[in-house]
Amino acid sequence: MEIVDLFYVSWHLLIAQAINFAIVLFVLWRFAYKPILKIMNERTSTIEKGLEDAKKAEENLIRAKEEEESIIKGARSKGQEIIESADRDADSVKKEKIEQTRQESEKIITDAKSQIRAEREKMLAELRSELGELVMLATDKITGDKISGEVNEKLINDVLEDLQSKKIEKAW
């Protein structure tokens, strides 16, 4: 008790202060610590949710990049197929046009040959006619008489055959 007297501690006051401390502690625990603890728990859960959302967003971003790469690869492959198809189509059209041009040129050549033959035949017919007249005139002048139609025809044909076999055939 000497200590109590030395420091002037009163038991009544000490018990009252202990009760006041307990009341303040209860009030702080009830009205301050619990709400602060609740706010901290909410904040912790919010942060954890934010971290989970960020992780999900990162995973979604990775999946989106993979999808994007897959789509780009598919588009490149499709583009390459289209280019190859266009090349094949162009080659096909080119070959078709070349064949068509070849056929047209053959037709033109065939037509030209036919036309040349027709002109040759026409020219030979004109030549026969003129040659026949010349032979008839020449025989008339040489013999002084008119030759009959049969003899005249035979002479014309002989001269034409002779000329044809020697000169005209070689020219054509």
Image (cartoon, rainbow, N blue to C red):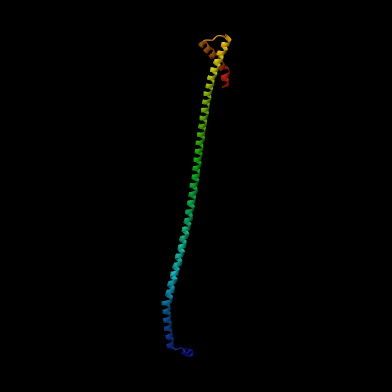
Above or below, 31 against 60 in this view is below
Q: Residue 163 occupies which quadrant of the picture?
A: top right
Residue 151 vertical placement versus 6 (above, below): above
48 relative to 129 in the view: left or right: left
Q: Residue at x 51, y 40 (%)?
A: 90
Q: Is residue 161 visible?
A: no
The x and y percentages for residue 67 are: 47, 54
Q: Position of residue 24 (x, y in %)?
A: 43, 81
Up/down of 163 relative to 46, above or below: above
* Front position in the image: 158 or 165: 158
Total labels drawn: 0
Q: Which residue is located at x 49 percent, y 45 percent?
A: 82
Q: Residue at x 42, y 74 (%)?
A: 35
Q: Is residue 26 left or right of residue 102?
A: left
In the depicted view, which residue is nearer to us: 14 or 149?
149
Picture quadrant where residue 126 is located = top right
Quadrant containing the C terminus in the rendered view: top right
* Picture residue at 48% right of the left edge, 57% below the top: 62
Relative depth, front residue between 94 and 118: 118
Q: Residue 49's image quarter?
A: bottom left
Q: Position of residue 77 (x, y in %)?
A: 49, 47
Residue 171 in view: yes
Q: Position of residue 36 (x, y in %)?
A: 44, 74
